[in-house]
Image: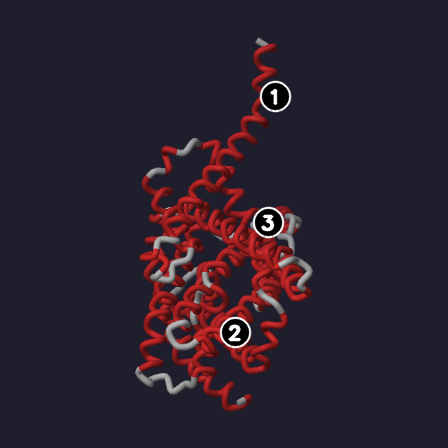
C-alpha cells in the first residue's frame, strides 16, 4: 500500500503543473482563433479589436461549453487572466513615446488630464451613489471610459483584484458606447454639428472615445491630420494609466485598512476585537506592472530597440492581452452579470453623455486657452 501511495503523492505537483500548462496552451489556441476572427473585414470594420472579440468568445465558451474543459486546466486559465495580464499591460507602454505626447503639447495634455480625472470621478460617484453599484464595478466602468477601454479595465481589475464578471460588465460598456462613438462622431462632424476644426476634432475624438482602435476608426473618416492628433491624445490618456493606478492602489489599500480597523473595533468582545485588529493587513495595492509600463514608455522614447523589434513585441503583446481577455471571458458567469448588468450599462450611458457634452466643452476651452 505504502509503495503505491508515494508515486501518486510525488506525481501530483507534476500533474498540477501539466494541467496549468495545458490550460495556458488552450487559452493561447483560443486567442489565436479569436485573432483570426477579429481580422475578418466585417468584424474589423466594426472597430472590434481582438481583445473585445476575445472576452465575448470566452464568455460564450465559459457559459455554454465549459464542462468540456478538464478541471485541472482552470489554473492555466487563471494564470492567463491574472499574471500574464500584468506582463502584457506593462509591455503596452511600448506603444507610447514621450516625443509623440510632446507633439500635441499642452492642449493635448490638458485635454487628456481633464477628461481622465473628471470621468473617473463622475463614473465612480454615479455608479456607487446613483446606480448603487459596488465600488469595483463602478471603478472598472469609469476606468474603461476614462482611459483606454478594455486595457484599462484589465489593469484596474488586476489592481482591485475584483471578480471577472465585473470586468466583463465594464468591457461591455466600452464595446457599446465606444462603437457608437466611432460611427456617430464623424457623421456629426461632417454635418457641422460639433463646431470643431480638424485640430479640435482630433482633440475631441482622442480625448473621449474609449478604445485606441475606435479612435483611429473614427478619426480616419475625417482627415489624416485629425487621425494623427487623435491618436497622440489617446496615447496620452494611456500614459495617465500609471499615475491613476498608483493613486487607486494607495486608496484601495487605505480603505481596506480602515475596514479592518472598524471590524476590529466592533468585535463581539475584547478578544475577538483584538483578533480582528491583529489580522494581517492587506498589502499596499500598488500595481508594480504600472511601473513596468512606464519603463517601456521610456525605452520606446529612447529608441533603444530597433523598429522591427518594437513592432514584433507590440504584436506579441496584443496577443497576450487577447489571451488575458479570453481567459477573463471563460471565467465570467452570465448569471453574475445579469444581476448588475443594467445598472452598469446605465453608468456607462451617464459617462457617455458626459464624455460627449463635457468633452466638447473641455475641447472648446482648451482650444480657446492654448489656441
Closer to the chain start, of discs 3 and 1, is 1
- From the viewer's side, name the closer residue of 8 and 335: 8
Image height check: is 233 above or below 88? below
The residue identified by callout 1 is: 10
Q: Residue at x 54, y 26 (%)?
A: 15
Cβ atoms at labels 2 and 3 below 8 Å apart = no
Cβ atoms at labels 2 and 1 below 8 Å apart = no
Which dot marks residue 233?
2
What percent of the width, then of the height, locates residue 106? 59, 82
Image height check: is 65 above or below 95? above
The residue identified by callout 3 is: 269
Give the alpha-carbon distance from disc 3 to disc 1, as whole Å.
Answer: 45 Å
Q: Residues within 10 Å of mark 2 (few under 14, many from 20)?
A: many
Q: Residue at x 47, y 34 (%)?
A: 73
Q: Residue at x 53, y 75 (%)?
A: 112
The answer, for residue 82, to whether it is visible in the render is yes
Amino acid at each position: 500500500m505504502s509503495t503505491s501511495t508515494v508515486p501518486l503523492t510525488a506525481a501530483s505537483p507534476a500533474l498540477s503543473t501539466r494541467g496549468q500548462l495545458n490550460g495556458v496552451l488552450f487559452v493561447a489556441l483560443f486567442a489565436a482563433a479569436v485573432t483570426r476572427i477579429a481580422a475578418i473585414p466585417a468584424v474589423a470594420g466594426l472597430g472590434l479589436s481582438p481583445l473585445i472579440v476575445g472576452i465575448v468568445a470566452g464568455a460564450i465558451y465559459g457559459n455554454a461549453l465549459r464542462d468540456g474543459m478538464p478541471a485541472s486546466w482552470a489554473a492555466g486559465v487563471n494564470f492567463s487572466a491574472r499574471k500574464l495580464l500584468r506582463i502584457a499591460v506593462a509591455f503596452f507602454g511600448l506603444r507610447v513615446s514621450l516625443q509623440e505626447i510632446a507633439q500635441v503639447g499642452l492642449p493635448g495634455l490638458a485635454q487628456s488630464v481633464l477628461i481622465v480625472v473628471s470621468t473617473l470621478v463622475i463614473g465612480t460617484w454615479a455608479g456607487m451613489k446613483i446606480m448603487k453599484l459596488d465600488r469595483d464595478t463602478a471603478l472598472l466602468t469609469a476606468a474603461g471610459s476614462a482611459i483606454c477601454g478594455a486595457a484599462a479595465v484589465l489593469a484596474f481589475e488586476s489592481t482591485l483584484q475584483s471578480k471577472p464578471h465585473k470586468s466583463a460588465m465594464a468591457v461591455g460598456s466600452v464595446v457599446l458606447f465606444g462603437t457608437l462613438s466611432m460611427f456617430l462622431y464623424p457623421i456629426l462632424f461632417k454635418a457641422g454639428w460639433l463646431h470643431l476644426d480638424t485640430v479640435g476634432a482630433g482633440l475631441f475624438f482622442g480625448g473621449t472615445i474609449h478604445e485606441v482602435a475606435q479612435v483611429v476608426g473614427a478619426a480616419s473618416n475625417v482627415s489624416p491630420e485629425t487621425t494623427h492628433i487623435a491618436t497622440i491624445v489617446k496615447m496620452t490618456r494611456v500614459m495617465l494609466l500609471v499615475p491613476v493606478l498608483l493613486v487607486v492602489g494607495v486608496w484601495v489599500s487605505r480603505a481596506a485598512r480602515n475596514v479592518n480597523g472598524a471590524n476590529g473595533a466592533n468585535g463581539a468582545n475584547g478578544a475577538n476585537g483584538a483578533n480582528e485588529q491583529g489580522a494581517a493587513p492587506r498589502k499596499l495595492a500598488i500595481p508594480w506592472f504600472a511601473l513596468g509600463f512606464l519603463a517601456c514608455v521610456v525605452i520606446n522614447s529612447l529608441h533603444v530597440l530597433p523598429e522591427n523589434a518594437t513592432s514584433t513585441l507590440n504584436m506579441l503583446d496584443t496577443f497576450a492581452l487577447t489571451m488575458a481577455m479570453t481567459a477573463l471571458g471563460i471565467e465570467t458567469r452570465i448569471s453574475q452579470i445579469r444581476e448588475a448588468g443594467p445598472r452598469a450599462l446605465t453608468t456607462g450611458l451617464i459617462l457617455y453623455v458626459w464624455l460627449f457634452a463635457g468633452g466638447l466643452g473641455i475641447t472648446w476651452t482648451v482650444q480657446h486657452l492654448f489656441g
